[in-house]
Amino acid sequence: MRLEAYRNQLNTLLQQHQYLSASFGDHRRARETLEGLEGASAEGEFLIPVGGETYLRGSVDRGAHVLIGLGSGVVSEMPRPQASEMLADRIAKIEEARRELEVQMSELETRIEALSQRLEAMTRGATRTDDVGGD
């Protein structure tokens, strides 16, 4: 039962790791986009994805603020450098959480392996006892 509980816990940690990895990628792309806009020409045209493989044509407004989600459906408007810094902080926190999860997963994998080996040894011992008792 303990082995099954460890495996379930490991599966949950793997799902959390996948979620954090996806979030990390989203935040990194958002920051790279904001930083890339700094060097873009004012006359340049961009395609802005709005979902469902649908895009809007747009251009860069150097003075425009960025809308950034703060959580729980709350959005704040702030200057581009401040939003980029906020994204950088989030990226660092997400990466730290991923590293902590990876340590937990490694420890759990070690426990699973040790418990599996103990169960296997007990099973082999029981099989040998059955073989000796049958003679």
Image (cartoon, grey):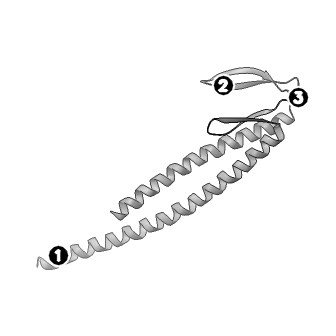
Question: On the image, numbered disc 2 is attached to which residue?
Answer: 50
36 vs 117, left or right, is right
- At horizontal 59% and vertical 24% (from top left) the residue drawn is 52
28 vs 5, left or right, is right
Q: Nearer the viewer, mark 3 or mark 1?
A: 3
Q: Secondary structure at mark 3?
A: loop
* Earlier residue among tags 3 and 2: 3
Residue 28 vs 128, above or below: the answer is above
Residue type pointed to by label 1: Asp
The quadrant holding residue 65 is: top right
Which label sits on residue 12?
none
- At horizontal 66% and vertical 53% (from top left) the residue drawn is 95
- At horizontal 88% and vertical 26% (from top left) the residue drawn is 42
* Earlier residue among tags 1 and 2: 2
Between the C-alphas of marks 3 and 1, the distance is: 81 Å
Residue type pointed to by label 3: Ser
* Earlier residue among tags 3 and 1: 3
Which quadrant is home to the N terminus?
A: bottom left
Which label sits on residue 131?
1
Q: Secondary structure at mark 2?
A: strand
Question: Residue 117, image x and y in percent?
Answer: 37, 70
Which quadrant is home to the C terminus?
A: bottom left
Residue type pointed to by label 2: Val
Outermost residue toward the left in this view? 135
Which label sits on residue 41?
3
Between the C-alphas of marks 3 and 2, the distance is: 22 Å
115 vs 124, left or right, is right
Residue 65 vs 22, above or below: the answer is above
Question: Residue 91, image x and y in percent?
Answer: 70, 49
Relative depth, front residue between 76 and 27:
76
The quadrant holding residue 67 is: top right
- At horizontal 26% and vertical 76% (from top left) the residue drawn is 125
